[in-house]
Amino acid sequence: MQGTSRLAVSRLTGTVPRSIISSPASIVRAKPLEPSSSPIYPSRQFHNADKMAADGFLKLMTERRSFYPLNKEIPVTPERVMEIVKTAIHQTPSSFNSQSNRVLVLFGTDHEKLWDITAEDLRAVVPADHWEPTGKKMAMFKAAAGTVLFFDDQTVVESMQQRFGLYADRFPIWASQSNGMLQFALWTSLVAEGLGANLQHYNPLIDEKVVAEWKVPAIWKLNAQLVFGGRTAPADPKTFEPIENIVKVSGI
Ligand SMILES: Cc1cc2nc3c(=O)[nH]c(=O)nc-3n(C[C@H](O)[C@H](O)[C@H](O)COP(=O)(O)O)c2cc1C
């Protein structure tokens, strides 16, 4: 969870030069798909097609940002949001394809209830003279259209630990990594559809009430909450670590 001034987190993303994102040269180089002579080592044509796809994906990555003040006017239907959620959860990789990711998507009054519950739990721990900024933040999240809650199913994690004892200590970490990939995929997809979103962490404070209110299995471990809605303001400016400090390359 972050306070009124957002915590600085390590920024591992580098800038994507414009020339790479929309380089006309990359479009000229692209060739129509041709059957590959080998399914294992695809032809150069397939590599060119992949390059075009990567440019589009990198552009969407660049456009994904933390959008904070959100409203309830989203440019797509809730059904479309659910279509995106279902594709994202199926297509997000997991260790050994263990599929430990779970989500609960809240719209409308259910979404509002989540932020009432969070405010109620925070009131018990935030000193009264510091409540005002926290209360405003809760109101800001409540004003959005919905929230996606992300969980790891510990039944899956434990079963993987039993099946593959050698990696037992790795499975909770891998489940968490897969969950992070899903968070990123969904966040990026929703922004690509024209919505705004921001990522919050009020777990474990709200865990018990979430289980009680929405009857999710208690064995699902809550990891994060992605608040989404209509954008009402641009994202804050963002700074980047110099690329040479964070990327090393060898062998080319
Ligand atoms: C693992 C992780 C945890 C985060 N936790 C929070 C959070 O609790 N509250 C919040 O407002 N933003 C949170 N963020 C968002 C980051 O602050 C934000 O992504 C970062 O400052 C870069 O800004 P951008 O999202 O606009 O690119 C989190 C992001 C990540 C990846």
Image (cartoon, rainbow, N blue to C red):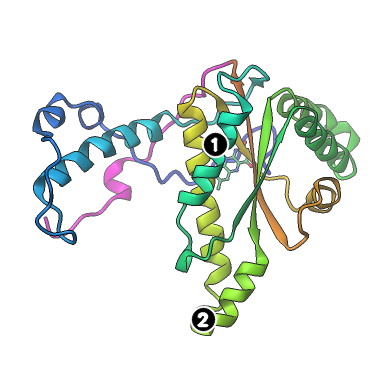
- Quadrant location of residue 63? top left
Quarter holding the N terminus is: top right
Please report the residue visible at 34 percent of the width from the left and 36 percent of the height from the top. Answer: 57
Where residue 243 appears, as percent x and y from the top left, is 29, 42
- Disc on res. 164: 2
Q: Secondary structure at mark 1?
A: helix
Please report the residue visible at 28 percent of the width from the left and 39 percent of the height from the top. Answer: 54
Tell me the residue that label 1 is attached to. 83
Q: Considering only vertical position in the picture, is 150 above or below 230?
A: below
The earlier-in-sequence mark between 2 and 1 is: 1
The crowd level at tag 2 (other Cα within 10 Å; few <14, some 14-19, many 20+) is few
Where residue 22 appears, as percent x and y from the top left, is 23, 26
Q: Is residue 48 left or right of residue 13?
A: left
Q: Secondary structure at mark 2?
A: loop
Q: For the residue marked with disc 1, what is the amino acid?
A: Glu
Q: Considering only vertical position in the picture, is 252 above or below 52?
A: below
Q: Of residues 164 and 7, which is closer to you in this image?
A: 164
The crowd level at tag 1 (other Cα within 10 Å; few <14, some 14-19, many 20+) is few
Start and end of the magenta stretch?
Answer: 233-252
